Image: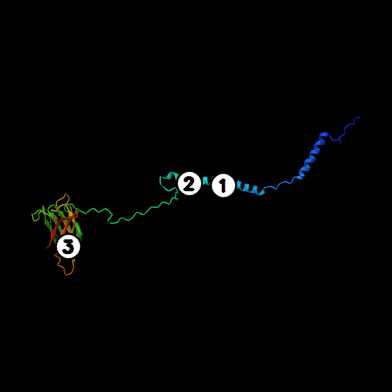
Amino acid sequence: MNHPRTEADPVPGHVETERLRRALTEVAYDITPSPLPLAAVERQGRRIRLRRRTAVLGAGCGLLLVPLAVVVLPGTESGAPSVTSPAASASVSPTPSTSPSASPAAPAPTPRIVASGEHVTAVPGFELWLTAEGKHWTTPSSPDPQFRSVADGNIARSNPGVNLQEESGDGSIYLSGLYYGGKGTASSVEVETAAGTVWGKLIELPGDPGWGVWYAVTDLKPGKDPFHFENQITVHNTEGGIYAQLRSR
C-alpha cells in the first residue's frame, strides 16, 4: 500500500545534490590555497604607471616643441645652427663722428663779386670799390679816394702779376693791390709781412674781367718798417696752384 509523500520526505534528485555538495565541501576543506603574488602585482602596477607617465611627458614635450619649431624652421638655412637664441632688443648705434680726412674737401673759396662802384669796408675807414677803369680806395689816414688804373697801360693784364699799395696808421698796416692775368680762378691771397703771414680777401667785378683787388689788415709791430713786407705776395687759384706772385727780393 502506497503512502502519500509528505513535504518532509526528500525528493530523490535533491538527495543526490545534497550528497554532492557535502562531498565538494569536504574536498574543499582539504585544499590549501597558494599565497597571492602581491610582489609581482605591485611590480606590474609600477610598470603600468611608469609607461603611462612616460606617455604623458612625451605628449607634453611634443606640445612644447611645436611653437619652437614654428620659430626656428622658417629662419633655418643650410649649414645654420639648429638652435635659435632669443632675439636681442634692437639698438641704434650712434653715428660715428666724421674725421677731417674722411669728410669731403670743402670747395675752394672764390673772390667776392661786387657791382661797379659798390663799397667794401675792410675796417672802418679802409674801404675799397671797383670800376671798369680800376681800383679805388680810402684809408683812415687818407680819407680822400685814391685810384689805381688797369687801363692806362701800366699793367699787362695778359701776364700774371700782383702789385701792392701799403699804408699805416693807428698801429695798423692797410695792404691792398691789383692781381691779374693768372690761369684759372683766383681763390685766396697770402701776404708775408714784418708782422708775419697775413691772409687777405679778394674782390672782382662780374663777368670775368681778368683782374681783381686783394686787401688785408695787420698790426704794426714796434720797430718794424711798415713799408716793407718780408718775402712775397701770393695769389692762389682754386686748384691750389699760383695764380700770380710778387717777390720782394
Q: What element carries label 2?
A: helix
In the picture, the quarter occupied by the C terminus is bottom left
Secondary element type, mark 3:
strand
Q: How much space separates mark 2 and mark 3, taking CA atoms?
A: 77 Å
Q: Which of 84 and 219 is in front in this view?
A: 84
Residue 191 appears in the picture as rendered = yes
Residue at numbered disc 1: 54
Give the total of numbered labels. 3
Quarter of the image for the N terminus: give it: top right
> Residue 114 location in percent, x, y?
19, 53
Query: Separation of disc 1 and disc 2 at Cα?
Result: 21 Å
Q: Looking at the rendering, which quadrant does residue 55 occupy? A: top right
**Which secondary structure, mark 1?**
helix
Q: Residues within 10 Å of mark 1 (few under 14, many from 20)?
A: few
- The residue located at (48%, 46%) in the rendering is 68
Residue positioned 63% across, 48% down in the render: 43
Q: Is residue 111 visible?
A: no
Identify which residue, 244 or 42, lies in the foreground.
42
